[in-house]
Amino acid sequence: MISWFLRRLGQILPTLLILSFGIFALQQLMPGDPALILAGEERGDPAVLAQIRAELMLDRPLLEQYGHWLWRLLHGDFGFSWRIRVPVGELLLDKLPVTAQLASMSFIIGVAIGVPAGVISAVAKDKPLDWLMNAVALFGISMPNFWLGIMMILLFSVQLGWLPPSGYVPLWEDPWQSLATTIMPAFVLGTGVASVLMRHTRAAMLGALEQDYIRTARAKGVVERSVIARHALRNALIPVVTLGTIEFGRLLAGAVLTEQIFSIPGFGKLVVDAVFNRDYPVVQGVVLATALIFVALSLVADILYMLINPRLRAA
Amino acid sequence: MSPSSPARRALAALLRHRLAMFGLVVVVLFVAAALLAPWISPADPLATSWSAIRRAPSAAHWFGTDENGRDVLSRVLWGARASLMAGVIAVGGALLIGVPIGLVAGLAGGWVDALISRVADAMLAVPFLILAIALAAFLGPALENAMLAIAISASPVFVRLARGMALEANTTDYAEAARAMGNPPWRTALVHILPNIAPPLLVQATLSIAEAIIAEASLSFLGLGQQPPAPSWGSMLNSAQRFIENAPWLAIFPGMAIFTLVLALNLLGDGLRDALDPRSARR
């Protein structure tokens, strides 16, 4: 287990290093001179430009800039927002709880719909119910999140007037209002997760139901409900748990447009606003933070896989 | 092609797959709409008309008119061009980038493989859309840049797929035979391995086009893709959002177009997978 963990870390560290270089190198794609953007009104003054270049080390070789950037990053310094002169790390910490709340709610909705639907679909294989669930999952996968969001606003806010169309109230200020502002975006994101989980749960259940131990259980006279819940589902859930962890990471990306549509001030809104304000350090910070969360989640997925799969644990 | 060749059997299986055929027909209709847009559009997609602003769907304007009095149906038809072009060119680019690199990684092994695999891991660690947004942001807002950003973001999937398939194919007897006959490695890869790994690549490419179309719509929605006034479904949805209360048709039709095209591509992709790979056939 420990040697496995070390080997896994041995893969992750180079990945992170390459990732950090890639994110740093994004700057090189940028048209124009960052010093000109930063100087604003004073862009005509060569002294100001020279000072900014020196401060940002733009006058240094690329690798030296990277080394310096990485060194500060390792000390938790994500740089400064060019726009509002606030440390990027602070901005990220500020927005993280919002996106985390949205992602958690979406994930709960996704699991609550997707896993039971997958089980029902597998048990009712090739029956109308299975066909229906597959159709719904296919619709969920093909539906662009942001369009579903707009259509839900049209139905629930404009037509029925049940829910606020946009805005966000923090959970600790007013839990009820917070749920009212996040339930639609969470549902929009949750349907995507549910569709993916449904397909995988169905496939895993079908695989499990074919196994010998299921035949044995049935032959022993175990009631069918128990065969499905205790014997098949427990084994089928092993790949689903790891997949669910990865899906949770993907929610962070899906949140970008959904947050935009519902005006929810999380990671997604932060990165989109930063893109429009040409606030590149913030864009880099968000990309880096999501990637770190994603890498951490895949590691958690691997560890969970080891823990719940007795065969691997013994090996 | 002999009557029982794998390609013919796969084609027969695909033709029998009713949902996949339905998907194919819908995709072909969209392609036709994109190609024929100049001739079948009822109006100029850019022509504004101050006397017909935000008119509800009617006999004169089947999909209504937008906030500048432009015909929404014409814009949806022309918008198919941006979406399909972005989907096909971006995924074509991703294939061109990903497959050779993946083949090299799988066949070369050693540190080359390790390096390529770690770079692919690093790119896959950034969620697809966020990577595309970041690339498009740094490249600047334009449809070409959005396509490039999507192509780069979609490429690691093909690197991984081609690498895995090359590793597997390399151990097979036909690769062994090709080597034994004195074929150089590049020839073995191109002539003997590539055709054998083409089916899964085709399946993945179809599904990736669906993803790329959503990505293009998302980037255009954010203002990072097709620039106004040129029509694209994503940017149409963006401006539609402001008028959701009194002109919902502005949001309904472009979204319906994205959804239908993506659904059709997913149906086709699933059908191709069932037809080309008997192992993954729906149980």
Image: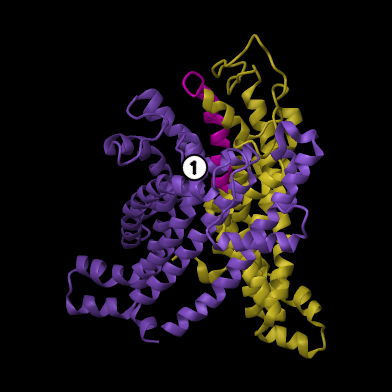
Total labels drawn: 1
Residue B47 appears at what percent x and percent y?
72, 19
Residue drawn at point x = 64 percent, y = 57 percent: A23
Q: At 67% from the left edge and 87% from the top edge, which residue is drawn?
A: B173
User: Front-most of A19 and B211?
Assistant: A19
Viewer-nearest residue: A299 or B213: A299
Quarter the N terminus of chain A occupies: bottom left
From the viewer's perspective, tell me whether residue B142 is left or right of residue A172: right
The residue carrying mark 1 is A145
Whether residue A1 sits left or right of residue B23 in the image: it is left
Q: Give the main secondary structure, helix, strand or loop, of the magenta stretch.
A: helix
Question: Helix, strand, or loop for circle 1?
Answer: helix
Q: State the extent of the magenta-drawn residues as a range.
A: B243-264
Which shade of the palette goes to chain B?
yellow
Q: Residue at x 72, y 54 (%)?
A: A57
- The chain in purple: A
- Is residue A31 visible from the viewing direction of this image? no
Nearest the eye: B33 or B211: B211
Quick check: A132 above or below B253?
Answer: below
Q: Looking at the figure, which quarter contains the C terminus of chain A? A: bottom left
Is A287 within the magenta? Answer: no
Q: Residue B157: x, y in percent?
A: 61, 63
Give the image location of residue B40, x and y in percent: 71, 28
- Residue at horizontal 56%, vertical 75%? A11
Seen in the picture, residue B238 relative to B180 is either above or below; the reply is above
Amino acid carrying mark 1 in the image: Asn
Q: Is residue A303 visible?
A: yes
Farthest-out residue, bottom? B180
User: Residue A297 versus residue A197: which sits nearer the camera?
Assistant: A297
Give me the chain letter of mark 1. Answer: A
